[in-house]
Amino acid sequence: VNQLSRDDDVYSLLARSICPEIYGHEDVKKALLVLMVGAPTRTMKDGMKLRGDLHVCLMGDPGVAKSQLLKHVSMVAPRGVYTTGRGASGVGLTASVNKDPQTGQTTLEGGALVLADKGICCIDEFDKLSDDA
């Protein structure tokens, strides 16, 4: 770590280590690195707290490795969750109510956003999310 901290280009080196099988996309990889590292929560003089949460939206042509990058980030991040818009609804990202077929009990299960609390939630194909409740 000490040797790495003395490297002048540590930012680029760490960015290139994200999904190394994908060539290029240096700016996207740097944005994902900053997302994974995050920013500190700051408390202002008046007591107001500013969260250090970051949000990244990847948009681009089909076949430029957006999904692969998201999957990699969700695997590397300590609390990373990957989901797709095809298999989820906007409401289902937060929670879902399920009924056990054997006992008849109703349970509430957390969705991707709840499971990734204080972590990273990667939502692929966001435009495919259904509006169904």
Image (cartoon, rainbow, N blue to C red):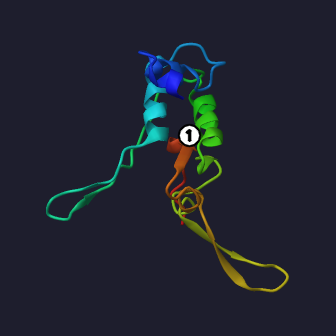
- Residue placed furthest toward the right: 102
Instruction: Return the residue at label 1.
Output: 125
Closer to us: 35 or 4: 4
- Residue placed furthest toward the left: 46
Q: Residue at x 69, y 82 (%)?
A: 106
- Would residue 71 appear left or right of 45 to someone viewing this image? right
Q: Residue at x 49, y 56 (%)?
A: 118
Mark 1 residue type: Glu
| Residue 58 seen by the camera | no
- Residue placed furthest toward the front: 2
Q: Residue at x 62, y 25 (%)?
A: 19
Mark 1 nearby-residue class (10 Å; few <14, some 14–19, many ≥20): some
- Would residue 127 appear left or right of 99 to someone viewing this image? left
**Measured from the top left, where is residue 69 in percent x and y?**
59, 30
Could you say whether the residue bearing mark 1 is in a helix, strand or loop? loop
Closer to us: 57 or 62: 57
**Measured from the top left, where is residue 110 in percent x and y?**
60, 67
Closer to us: 46 or 113: 46
**Which part of the image, by quadrant, shows the N terminus?**
top right
**Which part of the image, by quadrant, shows the C terminus?**
bottom right
- Would residue 116 appear left or right of 10 to someone viewing this image? right
**Measured from the top left, where is residue 124 in percent x and y?**
57, 40
Q: Residue at x 43, y 34 (%)?
A: 34
- Would residue 76 appear left or right of 39 to someone viewing this image? right
Answer above or below: position of 94 versus 84.
below
**Measured from the top left, where is residue 78 in percent x and y?**
60, 48
Closer to us: 92 or 81: 81
| Residue 90 seen by the camera | yes
Q: Quadrant of residue 114?
A: bottom right
